Amino acid sequence: MHLSEPRPKTIYINIDLLFDFYSVLFSAYRTYFAKSAISISEFKHLIEGRNLRNGLNCLLQEVTQGFTYEQVKEELKPFIDISLKTIKPNVGAYTLVQNLVNNGSTVKIFTNFEDEVIKYVEDAHKDWFNFEVLKIESLTDIKEDFDDERRDSIIYVDSAIESCINIKKEEDVDVIFIPHSKKLLESFNKDEATKKNLENLKVIAKESIQEVDWDRLGVLNNIKWPDTSYYLKLDAKPTNEEYQVWKNISKLDQPIELTSKIVHGFGRGGKKLGIPTANLDMTHEIEEKLVDLVNGVYYGWAEFMLASPTKNKNGELTYNTRLPMVMSIGFNPYFNNKYKTAEAHIMQSFEHDFYNTTLKVEVLGFIRNEADFIKFSNLIEAIHNDVQVAKDILGAEQQ
Ligand code: ADP
Ligand code: MG
């Protein structure tokens, strides 16, 4: 640990800690393979931390014979494309990077991903992501790059545990290991030997980038991460600009219209999180319409229909008025990933529930992939960003 005065440092960060590649792959693969009734949930570990080609190769070897990379890639491409076009920074990443740079540190972002994958990120985020990405073939390239710096000025941050160990064994630099999936974090937490190894080597292991104690590492830093309770108040104006960089969205070629009765969900706590979601009745017809949509969060309009089967006595529902909404489309774990669910959060408060009424939903565009957040506060912040993004876009569209 460096207890010297805080001063600018050079911080090497793997790009997969800054952008949510894992959700992109998971969501696209899961949507694609569901058509063949294959659930990839149990194969998640195979794509973790991998790029497009490696992730898919590992998946294909394990999941089934008879698919080839080229063949699947062709069919997967639309799913991957829309996902990569809308790739989001991981929660906190934008704030962190801006802060480090503003405080005089040098941020060096490295990757061994294919150029075509990185290009999507650069295109989608060109208004703020103006870093030259250091393309590496192996860790040797990183170590060579270290030679331009004083070793005690270097901090290396990676999601790959082997790389962290390798670097720390050979270089006298600070190393931070941040796993980027729940499963990896869990297996890491269970493995005493690995933990001991990291401890002995003095590799710092953290749950997320928001958890890193930059002050202790001698980095000039003054980020205050908001408390989870702040995000639970979804009506509050955001205190950070994180959501601004979430705004790249992908408009669907054709809006998708779904008319359905509102049914009970599985009480997975939408209301408790301050985001009740009206669950559509997944008729065969609706399922058909959603089959080609990547799992994730969408935005659009919702409208209560007069043909509502139950009379509404409260007089609070407005009919024939388009209300802004965000919608989550994904697989219901209850049905072991065979059936999709579609749940709409209308961005307005209602005094009463409206189960059994008929809602017409118009899905206009894609905000982000479904994600498996390690931290609850990250989930809440992501939903907050989704809502804010949808409000901005739909607000603009109405004028
Ligand atoms: P469930 O698991 O039954 O879907 P939720 O906690 O997701 O339970 O709550 C959803 C219900 O809350 C909806 O079916 C609807 O009747 C009601 N509700 C109240 N306000 C809203 C809102 N703004 N958007 C969506 N649903 C709402
Ligand atoms: Mg719900």
Image (cartoon, rainbow, N blue to C red):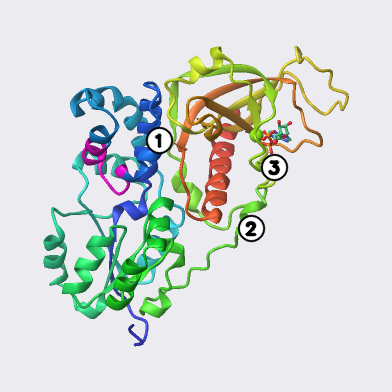
Q: Which residue is mark 1?
A: 27
Q: Nearer the viewer, residue 89 or 288?
A: 288
Q: What is the x, y in percent for residue 10? A: 27, 70
Q: Looking at the picture, which amino acid does disc 2 mark?
A: Tyr
CA–CA distance in space, label 2 to label 1 = 28 Å
Residue 399 seen in render: no
What residue appears at the point 40 percent right and 31 percent down from the top-left corner? 39
Q: Which residue is mark 3?
A: 271
Determine the secondary structure under disc 3: loop
Which of the 4 image quarters holds residue 56? top left
Magenta region, residue range: 46-58
Q: Which image quadrant: the C terminus?
A: top right
- Tell me which label, 3 or 2, sits earlier in the chain: 2
Q: What is the x, y in percent for residue 140? A: 11, 62
Q: Which image quadrant: the N terminus?
A: bottom left
* Magenta portion: prevailing SS class: helix
Q: Please, which residue is most extreme toward the bottom here? A: 4
